[in-house]
Image (tube, rainbow, N blue to C red):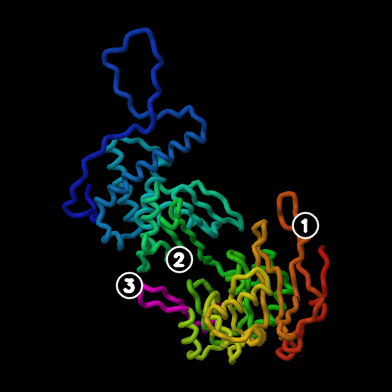
Amino acid sequence: MFSRYKKNETQKAAPVKAQPTSAAPEEPKRAAPPKPKAPAPKPARRSAQAAPVDKERRRKERLSEIKVEMHKRLLEDLNLSALETASEKDLKAEISDITAEFLADQGLVLNREERIMLNQNLYDEVRGLGPLEPLLQDESVNDILVNGPQQIFVERAGKLELSDITFKDEKHLLRIIDKIVSAVGRRVDESNPYVDARLADGSRFNAMVPPVAVDGSLVSIRKFKKEKLGVDDLVRFGAFTEEMAAYLQAAVSTRLNVIVSGGTGSGKTTTLNALSSFIDNSERILTIEDTAELQLQQTHVGRMESRPANVEGKGAVTQRDCLRNALRMRPDRIIVGETRGEEVIDMLQAMNTGHDGSMTTIHANSARDGVSRLENMIAMAGIEMPLKAVRSQISSAVNLIVQASRLQDGSRRMVSITEITGMEGDVISMQEVFRFQRTGLTPDNKIIGHFTATGVRSHFSERFRMWGYDLPPSLFEPTNPR
């Protein structure tokens, strides 16, 4: 076989004896003596008599075994450095040729569907991320969660489900993990058993390997959304109402400082992206993130991404480093993808010192919990300040807390919009302006509820009016479900 991608002077491995793809049915015992020249049993091509599930399982096991042998053959035969510049068409043709040669050598017979699947799986192993590749290409999948080689869960529409995709074994899973982290100059092993990285498409990747991961390596991939969901999209999906959108437009346009609070997977980044659409194009925006996910649609945006230390433990650039430098770059607004550490000090100071309209996200279950989390982060940063002074700084810096939540039916809602109105004694005073009111559950476990104003007039109504956003009083009146 000729190939421009084949290694020079490669010694081919001795062919492995063919393994029958399925056992030939045994002849029933008879009284007559056996024939003197019975032909050797050949791989059976007739339909199996087992149940469809068993047949499918055996088919996958057979393909998996062939794929392992084929992958070894590819590593031996192909010049992997030359493949870096090979086109997808050329590489797929090369894999198809090698597969055909291997199957002929081994006397294995695959139908057309199995051959196509095998070639695609091998292409994914060489160029992509193996079994994870089809899940990464599936636009309905939001999260990929791997619990060892035999369990891969995916999240679709807010619900987790077990996929039928698996790795061959732990070594196979570790090889894919190493392929991901080595591409970004990281490493993961027993001495450094966990790692964060970003895939080429922007998806967030986290892995933890044994011995810390007891039952096999753990992998979490938060897929990067290519489509830019706007406010109209979120209103159409039922994340919040047009009235809430009108209020948020006034809040962002009049440069209130906003925190989006919520749990993991609640839609904080999506909400932050949508809110940023209300920012005027004339403003200079600087974004700071651990993993670049924000998709701002303005023309004047400077993006920064923190960086972990390299394998020598050097070269780390934290979010706080980026934030301090951003203050010297004449920003009109600063948007921090997620505040979760000592950078909270610089973020609050930026909000308090002329960078009105800045935004960030935090992990918290409610607006009040969000304020407590800010207090805790300030304390953990080692800043010795009286609690009243800490709360005073928070109340003067933060104007609005938008609470996002992923409900038990998988839907994502903006469950609360709360204004911070100042201090009452030693306590930060707050008022909820909008909320999602749950009223029940359908037989198929869908949340029943509606959005409503609380009847409290916005603390910033006069500010809105002065900026040209004269919201009608009816916007803040409670509504009943239709």
Point 64% across, 87% down: residue: 389
In the image, taking residue 87 as reference, residue 461 lies left or right, namely right
Residue 202, which numbered label?
none
For this orientation, the residue located farthest to the top is: 31
Q: Amino acid at mark 1?
A: Gly
Label 3: which residue? 312
Front residue of 77/263: it is 263
Point 79% across, 74% down: residue: 454
User: Is residue 120 highlighted in magenta?
Assistant: no
User: Residue 287, percent across and down?
Assistant: 52, 80
Residue 201, which numbered label?
2
Label 1: which residue? 440
Q: Secondary structure at mark 3?
A: loop
User: Residue 243, percent across and down?
Assistant: 75, 74
Quadrant hosting residue 89: bottom left
Point 42% across, 79% down: residue: 317
Relative to residue 449, is residue 390 depicted above or below?
below
Front residue of 227/13: it is 13
Front residue of 351/202: it is 351
Sequence order check: which comes first, mark 1 or mark 2? 2
Q: Amino acid at mark 3?
A: Glu
Q: Secondary structure at mark 1?
A: strand
Front residue of 228/142: it is 142
Sequence order check: which comes first, mark 3 or mark 2? 2
Instruction: Report if the CB atoms under discs 3 and 1 are less than 8 Å apart.
Output: no
Whether residue 353 is visible, yes or no, is: yes
User: Is residue 316 highlighted in magenta?
Assistant: yes
Residue range in magenta is 296-318
Count numbered badges in the picture: 3
